[in-house]
Amino acid sequence: MTAERLPDRLRPAAARLARFAGRTLRGEWQAIVVDPVRQLARRGLPGLLLAFVAAFGVIFFHDIAQHPTGAVWVTRLGGVKADLPLWLSLLRTPVSLYVPALDLPVWAGITQLFLAFALAELTLGRSRTLAIAYTTTLAGTLVARLMVAVGPGWSGFGLPAACGHVLDTGPSAAVVGLFTYLSVIRRAPVVFTLTGGSMVWESIAVPNLAGREHLIAVGSAVVLGLLHGRRARLRALGRSLLPTRTPVPAPAAPKASPVLPMAAPASAV
């Protein structure tokens, strides 16, 4: 093959790739940006209630934690560690969403937090947004406890016992989970690469507790996204797996014997 014919053969493939990329970007722009903006125009600022509550909650707890007494109460209310009793971790997990992480800048993460909750609330609604945010955060917290419990080894799954003393707070797992869930149900590979893919790279480059939890949040959000819209199929599958009981026929009622007519008495002569 000559050098002159090689570019001619590559041009159709490059054109198809460019058209595919253009369609993908237009679809993602429509699904991730245009549709939520339309919902915002229809619902107004009340449609961003969760986003404002999440952003102001992080700012509130950040300001309180700047004082010694406030830091103690913030830790008591939302400080989650792997070495805490399970019931106490579960009790503090909802508040830990609003407690800023120690190693992350607060003001840089508030923009991502507000954007994630805003897009999710306008696309999914408040109930599902809260469910996805809490489920992905809880999944990361519980799996982190399991990793610390098994200890180092296990093909890199376990974590040393020192990670159990690390304060595990912040909304980053919820933010990653919401972005990943939206990218899955909206068929947005670019958004998924920028959010979930970056967390996978972070967990490989920096194998710490936060990176592992982000990876678990991405995985749980992918599973929830794949199950989106399949509630009827799951119910039908669950019913098919349950043992069916054959109804026992009711005992037949005994047949009544026929009543013979009584003979009339003979009349007297």
Image: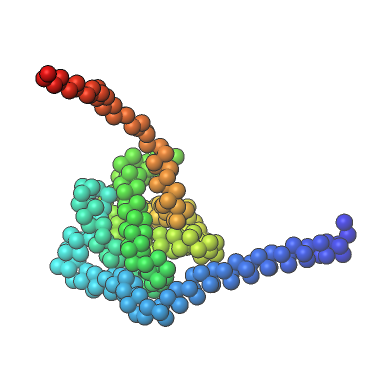
- Residue at coordinates 24% horizontally, 52% vertically from top-left? 90
How far across and how far down the image is residue 262, in percent?
Answer: 19, 22
Q: Nearer the viewer, residue 151 or 223?
A: 223
- Residue at coordinates 54% horizontally, 68% vertically from top-left? 28
**Quadrant in the picture for the N terminus:** bottom right
**Quadrant in the picture for the C terminus:** top left
210 sits left or right of 68 in the view? right
Does residue 66 appear in this view? no
Q: Quadrant of residue 103?
A: bottom left
Please, which residue is most extreme toward the front here? 269
- Residue at coordinates 33% horizontally, 67% vertically from top-left? 126
164 sits left or right of 201 in the view? left
In this view, 168 is above or below 125: above
How far across and how far down the image is residue 62, in percent?
Answer: 26, 71
How far across and how far down the image is residue 191, in percent?
Answer: 51, 65
- Residue at coordinates 18% horizontally, 59% vertically from top-left? 76
Q: Nearer the viewer, residue 250 or 73?
A: 250
Q: How many marks?
A: 0
Does residue 24 appear in this view? yes
Q: Nearer the viewer, residue 203 or 264?
A: 264
Q: Nearer the viewer, residue 24 or 218?
A: 24
Q: Quadrant of residue 93?
A: bottom left
